Amino acid sequence: MRWDAQRVGQAHRATTGPLGGTGPVVAPALPGLDAPAVRAISGLLRSVTTPEFAGMTFHEVAARSALNQVPGGSPMPFRYTVNAYRGCSHACVYCFARGTHSYLELDTGSGFDTEIVVKVNLVEVLQRELARPSWQRQHVAMGTNTDPYQRAEGRYRLMPGVIRALAGSGTPFSILSKGGLLRRDLPLLQEVAADVQVGLGMSIAIWDDSLHRSLEPGTPSPKARLEVVRAARERGLPCGVFLAPVLPWLTDTEEHLDEAIGRLAAAGATGVTVVPLHLRPGAREWFFAWLQREHPKLVRRYRELYGKGAYATPDYRRWLAERVQPLLRRHGIHQAGAGTRGDRGAGMEGIPGDPESRFPAGSMPGGGSGRTDGDQSATIGPTSPKATNNPVREQLKLL
């Protein structure tokens, strides 16, 4: 049973939830909870619905562990992750993490958007793990699977405790988000950045309002996310931006890219990474259903461009790189290499979902541009992505 690793004993059973609870409890909450092997810990989990989050269900889970170790052979520039939530109300049609919901026997389509698993005891467990003598204070990444600042964070407020626990133990960390709620914690991040290295990354890819509403219906507007970047920089914090995904024939025009890069530069982004859309299992099916509904004339072209794989063809990636490079120069964002393995700086490769592309400067603790000097750098996706034995499973191991 795939839920077993996220259960603890009867002592952690919750009946009212960490915040007292405002909605009805539905039990059993999740698939398999009525199985004989699970009845012994009945009451451990609950499913909560509230008027404030119409259409969503929060599955509250008591986790055994908080720190997840990344496989040794992974290209990620970190070895540990923390994920407060599974599933994501941002509901991005293209999200590479959709496939992870199938490992919980939950739907990767609308279920991923509305069935949110919440590790309600995350801070308590994390504090214990960080206090172990064996902990080496290695970089911990957040936002590598689903967004730590999605709507659920407004209810559960787990991130301030996570940030304080990491900083209090002297552990450097990074946060990747699309959530405007990140702005709430900027004063805290500014405070702890005096003691530990902090990296911030914001994802802002789609600047057309109608396309944004259709493809990223649960995310804040691009303008709101841009203000988070600006606010972070005003507080002296680094903030790199992922201009990802770039959608072939939808957001890859010179005008669209020029406007996006110009806005990012004006907001003071410490770095920019431009990555074309990738379509992993789970996301691929959901995206093509959207494409058939919204842009049926593009379906054949996308199938030709992606074939049966997750990546666009090398020719397209090369074409996009050639289009973006002069735009980066025009806006004063100096490119830090051509995006191939040979010229990567140490510890800056392997972004979640596209392990052949680099993290932008500022998004990793202590990497790239500094906090207040205003220097900017950019990276761009490679022209020939390297195949992996099982890239989807590798991403799942970051949970």
Image: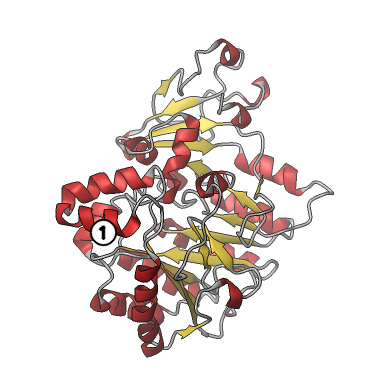
Is the residue 94 above or below the residue 383 in the image? above
Q: Which residue is mark 1?
A: 212
Q: Position of residue 358 (x, y in %)?
A: 53, 68
Q: Is residue 102 left or right of residue 304?
A: right
Q: Position of residue 130 (x, y in %)?
A: 74, 49
**Image quarter in which the N terminus is found:** top right
Q: Residue at x 60, y 26 (%)?
A: 4
Is residue 220 among the parts visible in the rendering?
no
Near-viewer residue (82 or 301): 301
**Image quarter in which the C terminus is found:** top right
Total tally of numbered discs in the picture: 1
Q: Is residue 80 left or right of residue 298?
A: right
Q: Is residue 359 left or right of residue 286?
A: right
Label 1 environment density (alpha carbons within 10 Å; few <14, some 14–19, many ≥20): some
Q: Residue at x 53, y 66 (%)?
A: 200
Q: Residue at x 68, y 40 (%)?
A: 125
Extreme residue toward the top, this view: 36
Is residue 176 among the parts visible in the rendering?
yes
**Residue type of the residue flagged with mark 1:** His
Q: Position of residue 71 (x, y in %)?
A: 66, 49
- Classify residue 295 by image quadrant: bottom left
Near-viewer residue (255 or 228): 255
Q: Position of residue 159 (x, y in %)?
A: 55, 51
Q: Tag 1's secondary structure?
A: helix
Is the residue 268 above or below the residue 76 in the image? below
